[in-house]
Amino acid sequence: MIKKFKYLENVILKNNLELEKPKLYHIIFYNDPITTTSFVIEILKTVYKKTEYDAEEITNFIHFIGEGIVATYPYEIAEQKIIETKKIIKSKGYPLKINFKPSY
């Protein structure tokens, strides 16, 4: 049984509304000789919610290749994660460099 609500009679529905998916951005960590692997793993687990296994795999990749994508988010979230991560890096005194760029 379908009920008809009087207040809905004046509502106009737009059928041609198309929503774009947000553009995604990669967060990239760069290897350096001073930042400890345990620190990078902890950042990946706490800020980026990676499992212990994934955090170790990503950290090893960054160590051997020199850089690596640690996560991909829409712009606003990526920007906030970068700010949060840089704050932690600064508080611990490590030279870890991070950045984000469009994933295309």
Image (cartoon, grey):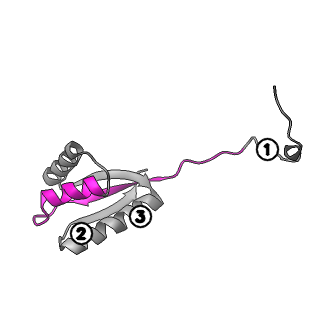
Q: Residues within 10 Å of mark 1 (few under 14, many from 20)?
A: few
From the viewer's perspective, is the residue at label 2 or at label 3 nearer?
2
Work out how far the residue at label 1 is from the one at label 3, CA to CA, in angstroms: 35 Å
Residue 30 position, x and y percent, is 22, 60
Q: Residues within 10 Å of mark 2 (few under 14, many from 20)?
A: some
Q: Residue at x 23, y 74 (%)?
A: 91
Give the quadrant of residue 84: bottom left
Residue 3 position, x and y percent, is 84, 33
Q: Label 2: which residue? A: 89
The residue furthest top is 1
Q: Secondary structure at mark 2?
A: helix
Residue 50 position, x and y percent, is 28, 48
Does the magenta-highlighted stretch encompass residue 76? no
Q: In this picture, which residue range is highlighted in magenta?
A: 17-46
Q: Is residue 88 above or below residue 1?
A: below
Q: Which of 84/16 is in front?
A: 84
Q: Earlier in the sequence, mark 1 or mark 3?
A: 1
Q: Label 3: which residue? A: 79
The residue furthest left is 33
The quarter of the rendered structure image containing the N terminus is top right
Mark number for residue 34? none
